[in-house]
Image (tube, rainbow, N blue to C red):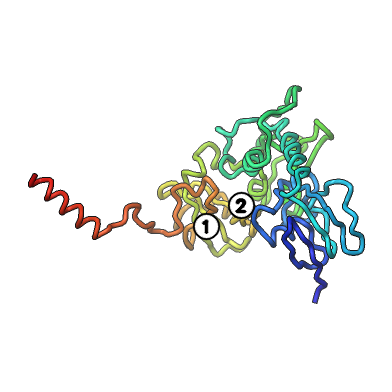
Amino acid sequence: MSEKVKVTIDGITIDVEAGTTILTAARQIGGDIVPPAMCYYSKLQGSGGKCRTCLVKVSKGSEKDPRPMPKLVASCRTTVMDGMEVQNITSPEVIEARKGVVEMLLINHPLDCPVCDQAGECHLQDLSYEHGSEATRYEFERRTFDRIDIGDKVQLHMTRCILCYRCVYTADQITENRVHGVLGRGDAAEISTYIEKAIENEFSGNVIDVCPVGALTDKTFRFKNRVWFTKPVDAHRDCPTCSGKVTLWYKGEDVIRVTARKDEYGEVEEFICNTCRFDKKKTDDWVIEGPRKIANHSVISANHYEQLMPPPVLRTNPALREANKEQFERTTKL
């Protein structure tokens, strides 16, 4: 049996296994005290520590050494100690620092949400709404890049990229031959391939799912619809390459997009192959399980029902109907 340690986050105490990070401990508690994360991905080894949105304040290091940590720390990379006390939303210092981090992420990110395919399921949109500032202090020219096609199914719009490295880790860990990465340094750093070499492997489409912004998009779905006009449905098939468990996005009776299933933090539950993602877009190809459960705060939940046959908006009330009938007859006589 593994050793348990006690950690307190925003006044809530929980026992977790030794070696657990502060972010993971916060996710076990759940709710508003979970720090946001743009680069950390629990399914990808080595991810985290780049975007700095998950900064928290450690007001007490441990029972043995109760001194506070002198600076804010990245919760996705900092392991808990027995007796540690952490402040997230209860610390004005953390709130102010997070506002500055969001401002930094938006320095070069274009404000093209109305035409971006990621709109409606973009973590940067949520982050900027919840923690961002109304204005920016940046006065210099923003960096821009030309759109490039990395393969026949994926388009890269580097101008939107926040360099979270998720797509690099995905290609490195679930494919046999990674051909893209981060080229250049500082302001010149970009996700790219040498001589725009195509990314061609059976799991290349997963870089679309892990991208938290609209930098990597599905060309087969590009500019076809908005996610809040579609109906997500869970389905599966007997696939020899992957688990075959996906989410189908319907527009009417047509499947216009296929994605991997994601958890409450927007992370893929199981990676899927390109055959399931791009080639199987007919209802007959799948076994339908039912409507996908969508969080109420998401715009995708608009007009979305978890029942295949939604209940009527206006329910029949016999007593009210009889009263209306009597009133109508009385009015007619008068």
Q: Looking at the image, is mark 2 or mark 1 nearer the viewer?
A: 1
Q: Which disc number belongs to residue 293?
A: 1
- Mark 1 residue type: Lys
Question: Distance of mark 2 from mark 1, alpha carbons?
Answer: 24 Å
Which quadrant is the N terminus positioned in? bottom right
Of 13 and 155, the residue lying toward us = 13
Q: Label 1: few (<14), some or many (≥20) within 10 Å?
A: some
Which quadrant is the C terminus positioned in? top left
Rendered residue at 72%/30% (across/down)? 108
Count of numbered tags: 2
- Mark 2 residue type: Asn
Q: Work out whether mark 2 precedes mark 1 in sequence or the reverse, and give the earlier one.
A: 2
The spot of residue 105 in percent (x, y) is 73, 36
The image quarter in which residue 191 lies = top right
Pointers 2 and 1 in contact (C-beta within 8 Å): no
Of 154 and 142, the residue lying toward us = 142
Apparent side of residue 270 relative to residue 325 in the rendered image (left or right): right
Of 19 and 62, the residue lying toward us = 62
Residue that carries the numbered disc 2 in the rendered image: 274
The image quarter in which residue 198 lies = top right
The spot of residue 303 in percent (x, y) is 44, 48
Rendered residue at 59%/34% (across/down)? 113
The answer to whether residue 93 is seen in the rendering is yes
Of 243 and 300, the residue lying toward us = 300
Rendered residue at 61%/55% (across/down)? 262
The spot of residue 79 in percent (x, y) is 83, 59
Q: Is residue 123 above or below residue 24?
A: above
User: Which residue is farthest front?
Assistant: 334
User: Which residue is farthest left?
Assistant: 333
